[in-house]
Amino acid sequence: MNYQFKVSLTDQGKRLDIFVSEKINITRTKAQQIIEKGLVKVNNTVKSKSYKLKAEEFVEIYNSSLPTEEPKILIPQNIPIEILYKDEYLVALSKPPNMVVYPSVGHKDGTLMNALAYHLEKLASIGRPLRPGVVHRLDKDTSGVIVVALDDQAYYGLVELFKKRQIKKEYVAIVYGELKGSGKITTPIGRAQHNRKKMSTKSKKTKEAITEWEVIKNLKNYTLIKVKIITGRTHQIRVHFSSIGHPVVGDKTYGRKTYIEVGNKKIPVPRQMLHALKIEFQHPITGKYLQFEAPMPSDMKEIIRILSD
């Protein structure tokens, strides 16, 4: 059974996330989660978490899809991880595909942070209990290099570098269709209006998003590209290339297909073919210039091999 409420004069002007948390006795964070998933409607329309309610409006909350309890602590787990670099302030890792960065509803363990908690003696205090030192992340199905702070001072330093766009990130991706030369996509990105789990270039509320790309190799009806993101919006690369008609191969959310076509064969693709290849920045504590590169995983190499034959 869903929850239904009529907004009173007392609640008029209240933010939607606060209203939801108060009415069904959940935390504001959980209220925001279900709002962003499109599970709360105001007069049968999905609204943002900051929407200011008006008297006489009807709020419906879909009870069957309310999130379960988040894990309370970060459990160390002996999961193999590839460490590219480590000092007393930060660690750089090569995240494999199909691994979530930190625990959440639906992913209580088996994450990169569960592995780090096992292999490292020290983690930052900021972001505890579940995401200590996490300053950026990669989608579950995106592989590649990621940096985690092990020290609070380093955490704040990395956050500042990201804010000032002084961290350079380079990706490689396989996209559908044939691209030529190089280019830049500057279409702003925001959360999709009717599906809060997705991002879109057609949202009413958007933020600046800049993606630069260059062709590495044409692969028949596909293209291997190098991508640099100047901004760091959620799903930025996937959304931008989908918006120009060249979605990332294997992208179940923004792509047309989850397979490649070679002759008369349709070959399944296990995930989106997107890899965070390289990251460069000045160490926030020592000032040393650092550059880390994560090797391309075997599944992506295999797709390139098949398309190159």
Image: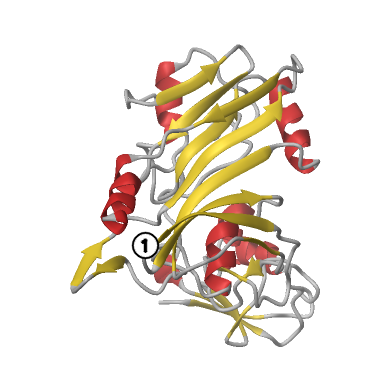
Q: Which amino acid lies under the numbered mark 1 shown in the image of this protein?
A: Gly
Colour mode? secondary structure
Among the 4 quarters of the image, the one containing residue 157: top right
Residue 37 in sight in this render: yes
- On the image, the x and y values in percent for residue 294 come to 47, 33
Query: At 37% across and 37% down in the image, what residue appears?
Result: 109
Q: Nearer the viewer, residue 117 or 256?
A: 256
Can you say which quadrant of the picture contains the N terminus? bottom left
- On the image, the x and y values in percent for residue 89 come to 64, 16
- On the image, the x and y values in percent for residue 308 come to 31, 55
Q: Nearer the viewer, residue 50 or 226?
A: 226
Q: In this view, does 45 lie to the left or right of 153?
A: left
Among the 4 quarters of the image, the one containing residue 153: top right
Among the 4 quarters of the image, the one containing residue 183: bottom right
Q: What element carries label 1?
A: loop
Query: At 79% across and 80% down in the image, what residue appears?
Result: 9
- On the image, the x and y values in percent for residue 27 come to 59, 53
How packed mark 1 is, by other alpha carbons closer than 10 Å (few <14, some 14-19, many 20 or more), is many
Q: In this view, does 196 lie to the left or right of 151?
A: left
Position of residue 253 relative to residue 145, above or below, is below
Query: At 56% across and 28% down in the image, what residue appears?
Result: 292
Query: At 57% across and 73% down in the image, what residue appears?
Result: 243
Position of residue 111 relative to residue 260, above or below, is above
Residue on which the image places disc 1: 250
Q: Which of 11 and 101 is in front in this view?
A: 101
Q: Residue furthest left?
A: 264
